[in-house]
Image (cartoon, rainbow, N blue to C red):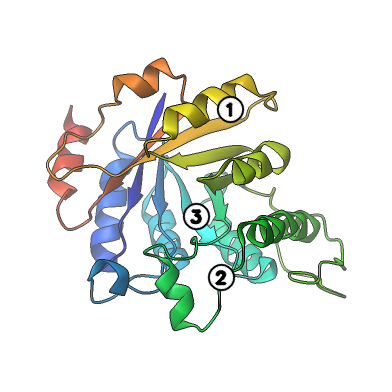
Amino acid sequence: MDTDFVLNPFGAELSDLVAIARAADATGVGAVWVNDHFSGEMVGAPWSRDPFVCLGAIGVVTERVDIGVLVANVTNRHPAQLASAINSVQSLAPGRVRLGIGSGAAPGSRFASEHDMLEKPLQSTDERVRLLRESIGSLNDIWANVPSNPSTSVGFTGLSAVVDGSVMPRLTVGASAWSTIEVAIDLADGVNIRRTSRLHEQLERLHAAELPAGFEVSVLDMRAPGAPLGVVPDDLVDAGVDRYIVTVSPADDLEAVVAMARR
């Protein structure tokens, strides 16, 4: 099983994000991800950092580790803008870029306040799932150089010259509900599920489903302060998870990551 890091951008200095990613590149970590949030207000932080600026800087200073966004919010990012951003990162880290996308925060959740700040009311679960499906369709069309897409939400007409011919990155859908997990099974290369009380129920249901060849199941775990890095919980090993993605704080965990590299 691969162990990945997802970097917390809230209140972080970009130099610290780059430093911890460079240290992770010297370990056996499979990938370094960055969250997609534009405000630190939800967690009491004074700012957040743009994920694609972070990934560009990380791509320049790393050589081995995969890099990606976990997950880009399709409610706030049109597929054309998202494709341009992630393809720009590909030009700095060829063959190492992954794209995580999600349908946006659930109404009433902590991160829904970002949508409130932009005066963008969150839609129902069904509408957000529809938008996610249509966004993936638009991304596929952009990479295939299809000039028009009929989606009423994320469609386009006469669109061209967005991406440079690189293969579309592996696509991971961030999911918490089964309806979103189904989108991942149908349209993506993998699914990322946050550890909650329902995790093992969802994993059992996933493994009972007919999954596409090469489909990756990953779990996002909020690491407790001071908890050791590089240790995969036994329950995830037993459940057959492919990737264990753990949160890392650039300000607090650099020494721990450097120590991993020295082992």
Cβ atoms at labels 3 and 1 below 8 Å apart: no
What's the residue at 40%, 65% (across, down)?
111
The earlier-in-sequence mark between 3 and 1 is: 3
Residue 235, percent from left and from top: 34, 21
The earlier-in-sequence mark between 2 and 3 is: 3
What's the residue at 43%, 59% (across, down)?
55
Q: Residues within 10 Å of mark 3 (few under 14, many from 20)?
A: many
Residue 24, percent from left and from top: 30, 42
User: Element under label 1?
Assistant: helix
Amino acid type at mark 1: Leu
What's the residue at 36%, 64% (across, down)?
110
Residue 115, percent from left and from top: 48, 75
Residue corresponding to mark 1: 206
Cβ atoms at labels 2 and 3 below 8 Å apart: no
The quadrant the C terminus occupies is top left
Between the C-alphas of marks 3 and 1, the distance is 20 Å
Amino acid type at mark 2: Leu
- Note whether 148 is above or below 96 in the view shown: below
- Note whether 19 is above or below 171 in the view shown: below
The earlier-in-sequence mark between 2 and 1 is: 2
Q: Which mark is residue 122?
A: 2
Between the C-alphas of marks 2 and 1, the distance is 27 Å
**Does residue 65 appear to the left or right of 210 in the view shown?**
left
User: Element under label 3?
Assistant: strand
Place residue 10 in its image quadrant: bottom left
Q: Which of marks 2 and 1 is in front?
A: 2
Amino acid type at mark 3: Val
Q: Which mark is residue 246?
A: none
